[in-house]
Image: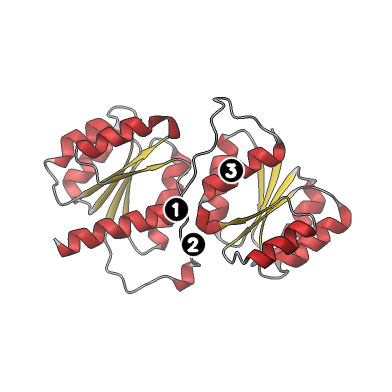
């Protein structure tokens, strides 16, 4: 597949894109500021660059200009500040795409496929995601929010680590389970406010865990994590008591909003 360089100072965005691009077979290199990004580009000769606009040391605009001085490598601009006039300027100067972080990482992955000319095996077009507010920097988050306990169950260690780190950055307490049996044990012992359950897990899948716990923990909000091909199963989970479901690759902004919505309902009930 491709050698992809990600230049972004948001560690969660870097981690999330690395997880999903690596699972798609790509080789991924990352840099957390503009200076190291330019060095990584010169040393690595990537096939594609995903570039944040708002970077320390050297701005994204300056990094883009330096890349264009030495190469015509495709560059996808990724930003939380997506003014239409800025998009026009970047595209005019040769950027392959100009994407908002608020539209979710699945759009980035679809655009990577488009730019690299990769045909999806199932022939299905990418699922259109609803637009959401851009992901704020960690320092700007509401640190006064009381901690809620969130249980995350997924058999993929990379996704488990990513979601755990993301939720902790939002101020939540987090318990992690790598299979369904551990998820049931932790849920009964800790009684989480929210349980994120991957549908397909070893020992007990997410559906079995939901059936077992929904009656025992009526105050908990169950959110199913599913692949795009499993959305019918996820909808069936709603009839079994799940609050909502979210598809992989996980739109972190949408997940945050879903959790907030569920916690608000629990607070007002």
Q: In this figure, which residue is indicated by the disc labeled 3?
A: 109
Say left or right for 219 vs 91. left
Identify the residue at image location x=48%, y=72%.
139
Q: Residues within 10 Å of mark 1 (few under 14, many from 20)?
A: many
**Residue 230, disc:** none
- Residue 148 in picture, x, y percent from top left: 26, 60
Residue 46 figure quarter: top right
Residue 209, x across and y down, in percent: 23, 35
Which label number is shown at residue 135? 2
Quadrant of the rendered image containing residue 10: bottom right
With 174 as the anchor, is 190 left or right in this view? left
Pointer 2 or 1: first along the chain: 2
> Badge 1 is on which residue?
252
Marks 2 and 1 close (CB-CB < 8 Å): yes
| Residue 181 appearing in the image | no
- At numbered mark 2, what does the secondary structure look like: helix, strand or loop? loop
Asked which secondary structure carries label 1, the reply is helix
The secondary structure type at the circle numbered 3 is helix
């Amino acid at each position: 597949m491709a050698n992809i360089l990600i230049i972004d100072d948001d560690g969660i965005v870097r981690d999330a894109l690395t997880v999903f691009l690596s699972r798609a077979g790509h080789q991924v290199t990352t840099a957390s500021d503009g200076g190291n990004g330019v060095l990584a580009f010169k040393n690595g000769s990537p096939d594609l660059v995903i570039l944040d606009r708002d970077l320390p040391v050297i701005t994204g605009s300056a990094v883009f200009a330096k890349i264009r001085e030495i190469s015509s490598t495709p560059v996808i601009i990724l930003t939380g500040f997506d003014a239409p006039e800025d998009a026009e300027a970047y595209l005019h100067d040769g950027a392959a795409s100009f994407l908002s972080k608020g539209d979710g990482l699945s759009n980035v992955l679809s655009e990577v496929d488009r730019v690299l000319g990769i045909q999806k095996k199932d022939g299905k077009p990418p699922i259109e995601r609803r637009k959401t507010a851009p992901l704020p920097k960690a320092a700007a988050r509401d640190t006064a929010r009381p901690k809620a306990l969130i249980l995350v169950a997924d058999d993929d260690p990379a996704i488990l680590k990513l979601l755990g780190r993301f939720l902790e950055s939002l101020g939540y307490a987090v318990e992690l389970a790598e299979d369904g049996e551990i998820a049931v044990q932790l849920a009964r012992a800790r009684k989480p406010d929210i349980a994120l359950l991957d549908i397909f897990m070893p020992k007990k899948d997410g559906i079995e865990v939901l059936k077992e716990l929904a009656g025992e923990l009526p105050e908990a909000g169950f959110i199913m994590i599913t692949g795009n091909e499993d959305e019918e199963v996820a909808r069936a989970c709603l009839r079994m008591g799940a609050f909502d479901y979210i598809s992989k690759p996980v739109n972190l902004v949408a997940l945050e909003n879903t959790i907030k919505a569920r916690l608000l309902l629990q607070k007002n009930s």
